[in-house]
Image (tube, coloured by chain):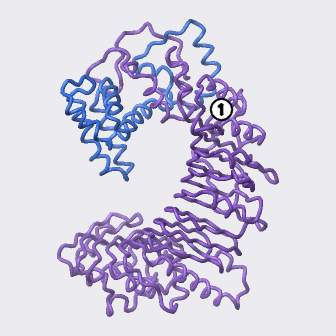
Chain colours: A purple, B blue
Amino acid sequence: MAKSKSTSKRSKKPILKLNRKKPIAVDWISDLPDSLLSHILSFLTTKDAVVTSILSSRWKTLWTLVPNLDFDDYEVGFLRISSSLPSYSTWQRPSPLPLLKRYRFTFPHIVSRVWSLRNANPNPPKKFRLRWQNDCDPIHVDTWLRTAITRGFEVLDLDIYLPLPDHFILPFTLFNHCKTLAVLKLTGSIVLDPPSSSAMGFPSLKVLHLHLVEYANPGSFSRLLSCCPVLQDLAVQILGNKDGENNFKIIVPTLKRLQFCIHIPNYKLEINAPCLEYLYFVGNIGKHVLLANLSNLVEAVLETSDSYLSVRCLTELFDGFQEYGKRVWAFLRALYNVKSLHLDSSTTECLCNAIDFDDPPMFHKLAYLNFGYGHHCLMENVLPLLLHQAPKLAVLIFDKKWRNCCVDEGRDCFSLEKMFCEDIPECLSSHLRTFHFQGFHRIKDELELIRRILKCAGVLKTMSVSSYPLTSEGKVYVLNELLKFPRLSSTCRIAFN
Amino acid sequence: MKFCTVKQYFDDENNNNVTNGIATTVIPLPNKHLKIKANNKEMEQYEQELLRNVMPQELTKLILAANYLNFKEALDFFCRTVANAIQNKSVDYVRKFFGLESDFEPGEEEKLCKEFAWSFEGVDED
């Protein structure tokens, strides 16, 4: 249990777990002033901070000095069924994990009580985080939100779940009176309806994350963005419902990081962000996607697939794949200045489908490429093509995902044909320093690929291989084979695990 | 920047706030911090090592020194270390850890425990 019966009358010098050598004198913590003690408490969740009020009379109200308040209905009073919390799939709101045990106090009771105790501190909280997924009552959420929104309010993180068709509409006061808000994160059953008043806007907002929320009107999304003049970090995950917003204009001159996740078939997207340094795109690339002004992009991660192709009829299928592949190449073209590119296996498969794309882009600054590999058997075209387009590539990571079709060792997973035998890409011979093969299966074509790269990599320093679990004889065999391969670069080290 | 206070400290010889020993721990921190800034795991290991080698009393002095020197990263680091040590632990454990003794009236403590019973949910049995 949390508390034992006996108190105090033990030895005056409790031995601490930290340092068994010397028992130290009592009470080293009380030298610190209240401000520093509450700073320590600010790194704890509110639930843990409140516990300290029982330590001693000095500590009774210290937790109220902490400028953050966070409440999570999974933490407070309810046992979780599993240790992992539900994570949202990419376009649907899952229902939350059911309650296993209901505690004596209800969640709103606890939150209201903590709020009222905290009012002993005349300074309102600067950060407010609330996750409420079981039996959420939007009236309470509205009340607490209005209390939190005061001068000096800096961070708001709301994660609400309400079963359809209910939802929580953000109060106008949030849009009109949060001039110091720097971080806004909204997840779940929340509707954004930015009012048309002139006071609307977030002049200090730097971080905006919108996950699976709804927008009241077409244009709400773009209007919200246009009132965030210093926005730097934007993450958007679009809810996959048919009648939702489907026109997204992300024209933000100050934006540095963008994550965009979308899985609806028809939408329009425009991204124009000259300061953008990091882009993470997940989902299907629609017909009307326009990327412009991304010359400062440093890193891009692409996980795309056309999940709607399976719905088309068979005769269109091939054209459909090719058409989509061209769209992926066109998307890549806009990322021409990146230094680091991460393409997952579905993306590279899509690129495969349109291998005769006219005028593939050159990536003159690309130094790091993470190439995900699925199981498509025309891989011998895409990898060399990309390497040809990236003359300065220094790090190549080949990430192979295990699929059932590759279980048979005898069958080739991908045909190498003449890959890297003639017409060796410039980056291989004179720039590649590190090659990492992840997901090695001990299939003969994998070894052959490594052999060919070792043969023509002139300045390779490290070649490392991570494999799926192998028997110890298997490991020995592979390591021996790897060491036998001739290496063009004399400084090359081989690692295998 | 953050080092103007450090310079001030070195200029001012009779400084009671920061003893030499503490200074040698705090000052190299910015370099260490910059090096392992991105790597969370390394930071955790460094934190563990620090906790093992440093006596709690020194931790207080480190916090006070970092605060005086206006060194935000170090201050956050040390405070977070203390917070991690008491996170999700029982009241008794935390009292022992800090060397505190309860000075409540009898019954007052029981009342508080009842009120905040919900916050003991899932606490480490220690």
- Extreme right residue here? A165
Instruction: Give residue A146's position: percent from left, percent from top.
Output: 71, 38
> Alpha-carbon neighbours of circle 1 within 10 Å: few (<14), some, or many (≥20)?
many
Q: Name the residue carrying label 1.
A: A77
Q: Nearer the viewer, residue A186 or A345?
A: A186
Residue A130 is left or right of residue A440, and the answer is: right
Task: Using the image, name the chain to which the residue with label 1 belongs.
Answer: A
Q: Which x, y percent locates residue B111?
A: 63, 14
Q: Nearer the viewer, residue B115 or A411?
A: B115
Total marks in image: 1
Which residue corresponds to the image point at 59% horizontal and 55% vertical from the top-left? A208
Q: Quadrant of residue A10?
A: top left
Q: Label 1 sits on what residue type?
A: Gly
Q: Residue at 58%, 68% (x, y): give it.
A: A282
Residue B118 falls in image quadrant: top right
Describe residue A215's horizontal placement relative to residue A469 as left or right.
right
Which quadrant of the view contains residue A221? bottom right
Tag 1 secondary structure: loop
The residue lying toward the viewer, choosing from B7 and A57, is B7
The answer to whether one can see residue A289 in this image is yes
Q: Position of residue A158 (x, y in %)?
A: 65, 46
Q: Is residue A193 left or right of residue A17?
A: right
A468, above or below A353, in the image: above
Asked if one can make out residue B117 in the rendered structure from this viewpoint, the answer is no
Q: Nearer the viewer, residue B124 or A202?
A: A202
Which quadrant: the N terminus of chain A? top right
The C terminus of chain A sits in image quarter? bottom left
Depicted B29 relative to depicted A263: above or below: above
Q: Position of residue A348 (x, y in %)?
A: 50, 78
B11 lies left or right of A14: left
